[in-house]
Structures are given as structure tokens and as C-alpha cells.
Image (cartoon, helix red, strand yellow):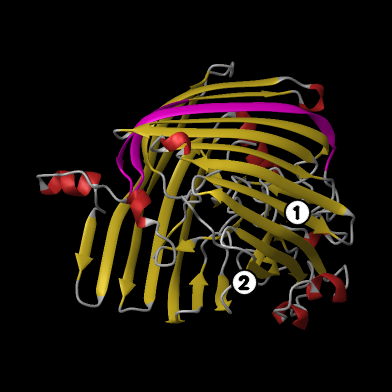
Amino acid sequence: MYHSTKKMEGYTGNSFFPALESQYDLHTKIQDTSKQYYLVTEHLFKKHFLEFKGKNYHLMISPVFDFSLGKDFSDTASRKLFQNTRGFHIEGDLFKNFSFSSSFYENQSRNPMYQSSYFNAIGESYVVTADSSYQTQNAVVPGMGRTKPFKNDGYDYAFAMGDIIYIPFKVLTISAGNTRKFIGDGYRSMLLSDNSFSAPNLQVNYRFLPRWEFVYLRSKLTNLLRRPASTTVEAYYDPTVLAVNYLSFKATKKLTISLFEGTNYSKGDSIVSKKASPWMYNPIPLVGAFVTNASEANSIIGLNVGYTVLPSMRLYGQIALNSRHSGYGGQLGIRFMEPFKVNNLFLQVEGNYASQNLYRSTNPRISYSHFNLPLAHTKGEGFMEVLVRANYEIKRVYVDIKAIFYQLNEYSNQTHLALYDVGPRTSGTILYGTMEAGYRFNKKMNFSVFVNYTFRSSTVGGANQLTNVVGIGMKTNLINSYTDF
């Protein structure tokens, strides 16, 4: 089994997540040692809803949900905001070498205006028969996928994730499924992020020699661009293939340096389907970035560096380059886990930068995106970001604070779409802040009740937009959801 947390004390791995619980001591962060005297409270505070354990298996089943209500006091329409999520999560171990997980989420929501505007702007594109231009329909929620309308200004959407893991040898791990991936030690990733939608993938991790590890990831991606002609009820979307080669070297006990190559390969256009270039199977980093034609492949190459200064302090950084388009970006950050020996205190400061055209290709169908969502940073490209995060918990009561500043430069939220027209580019600033306080019942399911407040001020394009949202709810928070753009 594995856990998707990125806040681990003394972590010195290769920063490719999710990580195996068997490989790193993650249990101590989610284990509840409190004494419970009743079966109901034992499950409420310490266990999954259902747990079955035998000689060669361990199965855990729990419901997942997010029920919340809110109001944006800057919204003159006085819309009632809500999130209604229901589903289930299953995970288990079979014998010594097999693990699996599966989750399903059904959602309805009404969101603040700045979120709705973004969701609608990156919706799926259809061909207009009259002039062969494209129009946008429906919407896309980051990490959650395509939507359909719900109660006029709301969204209805569902998604599922899961995978199976096989460890035939101690040095070899093979997984297949459609879980989201994340590379890096930061809150954001400039290389590969779980901001995008889940996609079918095959991943192989091979640890060779004492200090080296290689990750081979191949995934089928989708542009939400309907083909103009179809013999089926609905026209197909444009497919692409993502090939990730990730080579890590543990230079010292505390320092890990990783070389990244992520290449999006073409599988045709709106008329012709074809096989991806055979270079897609190549496992050697940097080859795909230089030997393939720019119209057939779009490569992001980079470095990921993590240095554990102290068990409670980790420095990290990333460099991202698009050699064909002179695009570049980077990240620099520091995080503290229980600094000054304060239990359950977490602090983080991070800066991110992406130039224009870092992820976009001359052939927009192979821009660095999936499901009309950026594969890396949720903001795409053309920005500078500084963020500060803090989290503290005592006796199950927690407070989480986050502040973000964006400087946008000739920015468009459509540069990653599979279309040549990216719309008008604008500049400006965004100030975002949120604070949440709650009571966490169960760490394994991250089940909590909460109240929160979100402030956002945007001056992008010369227009002032304010958001002041107060919310309350209860949730099991197992997956990341990014609305801080």
C-alpha cells in the first residue's frame, strides 16, 4: 500500500510520488495510539470503516465524502456555494508482493466565480460545422475531470482512480492503473503534478546499485478536443502518449539529484490517427527531447534536487526547460517538519516561476497537458509565484494557513489547450489567502469537520475581482484538490 502525503520527517527518497509505505516509514504519521474502549470509537478514531485481515490478505474499505456549504460575501448574486461528494475507497495487500487500491467519487458543486470562470474556459471543444471553428462546452475541474451542468450554475462530475502494485524483487516495483503522479518535494511541481486528471499508466521503478534508481512511466493522455467526424454516438477525443524517464542519484545520505524527461508524443490529428513514434519506448533520458521532430513530440527536461539538512528541515528545488521553444522555469523552497521540536507543526516557503511557452508546443495538440489541464503547475505558464504554508495540530484540533502571491506576465489560462488560438494575454497580480480550522477524527481517512475562510484579490487585465468565502463542512481528505489559482 502507499500513502500520498508529501510531508515526511527525514525523507531522503527520489521525490516521485505516491511512495510505498513499505519503503518509507509513513505509518508513524497516520497511526493513532489513543486508547479506545468501544468498537464504534475504535473505527471512528483509528481504523477504516471495515477491515478484514487473514493469513495472506489485508483489506480495508471506507466511505469518502465532502459535504460543505459556503457563501461568497463579495458575490452580489448571493449564490449559495456547496460541495456534495460521495464515494468509497478500497485498499489491500495480497500475499507478500501484491497491493491494490480503488476509489470512486460522485460530485455536485457550485463554486466561487473565479473558479467557475476557469472551469468553463478550459472545457471540452467541439467543431462548429458551419465554419469548422471550435466552441467550448461543459467545463473541467482540476484533478476531477469533465463536468455536465447542474442546477444552472453548478457542476456534476464523477471520477475513479486505482492501481495494482507488484514487487517481484526488492529492487523492482511494477504498477499499473490510473492514479495521479507528483514529482518533487514542494507544494507545486514544475515537472509533473497531480493537478491534472488521472490517466491510464504503467510505471516501473528499478533500484540498481546502492545509490541509483530509475522510474519508467508511460501514460495515455487525452485532449478534450472532439474529432469532427465519427461513426460512434460521440466523436472521439484526441489521444497522445506521455513518456517519463526519471533517473535519481543519491549523492549523499541527505542529498538526492534526479534527472527528468517528460515527452508528449503525437498520435495524429483531427482527421488521421497513427501510432506514436517508436522513440516513445526509449528508456534513456534526454533522447526523446533531441531526436524527435518538434511536430511529433514536445519535451520538458529538468532537474529535481532535495537536500535534508536536518531531520526536520528539507531544502528543495527544480529546473524545467523546453529546449525547442526557449522556455524555462524553476522552483526553490524549504519546509520544516516539527521545527524547534514542536510536535505536529509544519512550515513551508516556496517560490515558482514559469516563462511563456515553457509547456506549449508549436503543435498545440502535444502541449504539456492532459484533459485540458496543465501537467505541471496548476497555473500553467507566464507567472511568478510565492507561497507560504503553515499547519499545526494539537489534540486532534488543527489549523491550516496558506498565503500565495502571483505576478502574471502576458498570461492566458488557455495556452495549454490543443488549439492555436490561446485567447487574449493579460498581466496583473493575484493575492490569495485561506485559513481552515477543524477537528480531525481519523488520520487514516483524514476525516474531519471544519470551518474555513478564503480571500482572493485579482487585478489581472486591469479588472478588480474580489472573493470572500466562508465555509463549513465535513470531509475525508485523501486526494489533493487545487483551487488556489
Q: How far is mark 1 from mark 2, CA to CA? A: 20 Å
Residue 482 position by quadrant = top right
Instruction: Classify 327 as above or below 58.
Output: above
Image point (29%, 33%), residue name? 395
Q: Give the image location of residue 360, x and y in percent.
A: 81, 55
**Residue 297 falls left or right of residue 393:** right
Comparing 328 with 408, the one in front is 328
**Residue 58 falls left or right of residue 123:** left
Residue mark closest to the camera, 1 vs 2: 1
Amino acid tagged 1:
Ile
Q: Give the image location of residue 345, x and y in percent.
A: 44, 36
Instruction: Look at the numbered disc 2 and give the secondary structure of its residue.
Output: strand
Quadrant for the C terminus in the image = top right
Comparing 449 with 286, the one in front is 286
**Residue 239 falls left or right of residue 470:** right
Span of residues in magenta: 423-452
Q: Is residue 449 magenta?
A: yes
Residue 198 position by quadrant = bottom right
Residue ID for mark 2: 217
Residue 268 position by quadrant = bottom right
Amino acid tagged 2:
Leu
